[in-house]
Image (spheres, rainbow, N blue to C red):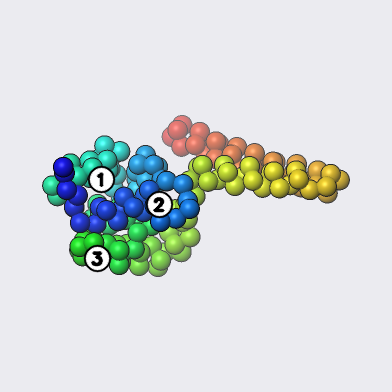
């Protein structure tokens, strides 16, 4: 049976969210987050091979970024024997906290979580007693969502046409 590198057990536990009531974060979603925030990219296959113990060595920077995207702490990494990765994770967190734009990024905002939030708000609005104010609120909510989507569609089109 393959053995996993120190620190990987923490990443698996945090990704699978075994100690919370949150839904498991898929490898694909974790890799997508990794590729959005790290200064380089990895593949689903590489992440899976690391978690599966199919690699003998894992770079400390990979461990640190993997831990970051699943919400593991540097203390957890250090307790699992990944001291260098824990130190790098401290640096990642400190740097991101110093940059307001990066610090404000909520890694729990997956497309699924956003969709769920929109559906929940719409359901809450629709559960209010029906009157003109509730109808305006629903209409404005849907218009704002539509506007945001259209703005990003336009920006994407502008970038594609460059």
Rendered position, 161 above or below 46: above
Residue identified by numbered label 2 = 17
- Locate the N terminus by quadrant: top left
Q: Earlier in the sequence, mark 2 or mark 3?
A: 2
How many marks the image carries: the answer is: 3
Residue 150 position within the rendered picture, expressed as x and y whole percent measured from the top left = 60, 37
- What separation in Å lies between label 2 and label 1 (alpha carbons)? 14 Å
Residue plotted at (19% across, 45% down): 53
Mark seen at residue 110: none
* Residue 45 figure quarter: top left
Residue identified by numbered label 1 = 51
- Locate the C terminus by quadrant: top left
- What is the residue that sits farthest to the right in this orientation? 131
- Residue 32 appears in the picture as rendered: no
Residue 104 position within the rendered picture, expressed as x and y whole percent measured from the top left = 48, 60
In contact (CB < 8 Å): disc 1 and disc 3 = no
Of circles 2 and 3, the one toward us is: 2
Residue plotted at (83% across, 47% down): 129
Mark 1 residue crowding within 10 angstroms, few (<14) / some (14–19) / many (20+):
some
Residue plotted at (59% across, 39% down): 149
Residue 21 position within the rendered picture, expressed as x and y whole percent measured from the top left = 48, 53
Secondary structure under tag 2 reads loop
Which of the pair 7/36 is nearer the observer? 7
* 133 horizontally vs 34: left or right: right
Secondary structure under tag 1 reads helix
- Residue 82 appears in the picture as rendered: yes
- What separation in Å lies between label 2 and label 3 (alpha carbons)? 19 Å
- What separation in Å lies between label 1 and label 3 (alpha carbons)? 18 Å
Q: Earlier in the sequence, mark 2 or mark 1?
A: 2
Residue identified by numbered label 3 = 78
Secondary structure under tag 3 reads helix
Which of the pair 108/23 is nearer the observer? 23
């Amino acid at each position: 049976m393959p053995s996993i590198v120190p620190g990987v057990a923490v990443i698996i536990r945090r990704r699978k969210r075994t100690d919370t009531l949150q839904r498991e974060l898929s490898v694909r979603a974790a890799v997508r987050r990794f590729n959005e925030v790290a200064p380089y990219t990895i593949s689903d296959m590489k992440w899976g091979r690391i978690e599966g113990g199919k690699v003998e060595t894992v770079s400390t920077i990979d461990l640190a970024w993997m831990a970051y995207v699943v919400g593991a702490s540097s203390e957890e990494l250090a307790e699992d024997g990944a001291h260098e990765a824990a130190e790098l994770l401290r640096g990642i967190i400190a740097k991101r906290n110093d940059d307001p734009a990066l610090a404000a990024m909520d890694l729990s905002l997956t497309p699924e979580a956003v969709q769920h939030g929109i559906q929940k708000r719409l359901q809450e609005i629709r559960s209010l007693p029906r009157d003109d104010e509730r109808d305006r609120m629903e209409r404005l909510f849907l218009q704002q969502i539509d506007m945001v989507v259209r703005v990003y569609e336009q920006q994407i089109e502008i970038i594609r046409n460059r």
